Amino acid sequence: MAPSFDSSNSLYDFVVRDGNGVKGLVDSGISEVPERYIQPLQERMMNKHDSRLCDVPPIDLSKLNGPEHEKVVDEIVRASETLGFFQVVNHGVPMELLESLKHAAHAFFSLAPENKAVYGTGVSPSPRVKYGTSFVPEKEKALEWKDYISMVYNTDEEALQYWPNQCKEVALDYLKFSSKMVRDIVEILIRKQGAELDDSKIEGLLGMKMVNMNYYPACPNPELTVGVGRHSDIGTITVLLQDGIGGLYVRVGEENGAAKEEWLEIPPIPGALVINIGDTLQILSNGKYKSAEHRVRASSSESRVSVPVFTVPLATEKIGPLPEVVKKDGFARYREVVLQDYMNNFFGNVHAGKKSLDFARINIA
Ligand SMILES: O=C(O)CCC(=O)C(=O)O
Ligand SMILES: [Fe+2]
């Protein structure tokens, strides 16, 4: 018997406060998306078959170590300057680990609600581990159809002590195996802007790492809601593992020649990882690299999981356009910001496309 939520508040309490999440809502037997999840018309995502697939072939990262080095560098730079999204293969993360990560995500979200709720805000045994739902539910008019667990890396010991048993080992391995690729790509992109950063500056830019596991339960009316609303990520780059269900879309902007707003689907490619540029690289490059605006459609048939690793500068780091680029351009598009302030602004507001960048933007008359 499906529960009746006689007010929007009782639904909010069930999903958010009591930690049942969207998964709990679906498991309770609902047959349609509750009012609280219905997005305004302009944010809804139309039928899956109405949009084009992004057909750019994945970039083979192993070729960075061979005679085609420059060609691969160009592919990475070009993708970062246009869509801000690309896929990579031969990336150094073992295939079996990718499979284990998807299983681990399902294992964690299959736990009984009370076993996930122990990682909720205010009760989690570590401030660096957080289970939640939607993005900032206390501020959102319409909630997002997603539950997540987020794990910020500090030390191995801490991760093994506090991250959930169902996923801690694989999440830690994933973070380690992907770190080299993240560093290589970020170094390539910075060098292409004519800047040489010393090791300590690079470490500062890559200083904070967070692994998330996202869970999007099968949804009775995917056309009325969103899995994740339009946003850009705030860090340097994000590495994302998606399963085979699909539903990740990136916005093609006017700068890429689109006449009107268009969203391309980033198709699941077995064994590939998705890379997207975050706000930090857009700011550092004075706008040359495009932090990608993206969103996720809920799926009607099966639950979907995705596992991003976010690489973000240290909270104390000051981020501004690289002096070499400002010199070439003759002006700065962004002011220098302290990353902690930038994050507080991002996590304190609902998803709203690339509005997060306004926090650092200098309005040029
Ligand atoms: O699930 C996905 O494919 C993307 C998720 C995402 O954009 C995020 O977690 O920032
Ligand atoms: Fe994202």
Image (cartoon, grey):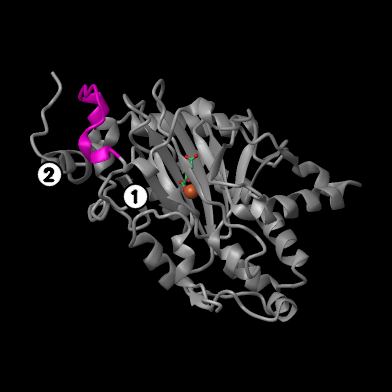
Q: Residue at x 78, y 42 (%)?
A: 62
Give 168 or 301, whichever is nearer the viewer: 301
Mark number, residue 135: 1
Q: Is residue 182 above or below residue 20?
A: below
Mark number, residue 9: 2
| Quarter the C terminus occupies | bottom right
Look at the numbered disc 1 and give the secondary structure of its residue.
loop
Rate crowding at label 1 as few (under 14), some (14 to 19) or many (20 or more) other CA atoms within 10 Å.
Answer: many
Q: Report the span colored magenta.
A: 25-38
Q: Can you give x and y, in whole percent of width and height, for residue 225 in the image?
A: 34, 36
Q: Mark 2 or mark 1: name the one nearer the start of the chain.
A: 2
- Left or right of 45? Residue 96 is right
Q: Amino acid under label 1?
A: Phe
Q: Can you give x and y, in whole percent of width and height, for residue 57 in the image?
A: 73, 36
Residue 175 in the magenta stretch? The answer is: no
| Residue 79 visible to an observer of this rendering | yes
Q: Can you give x and y, in whole percent of width and height, for residue 352 in the image?
A: 40, 55
- Left or right of 303? Residue 132 is left
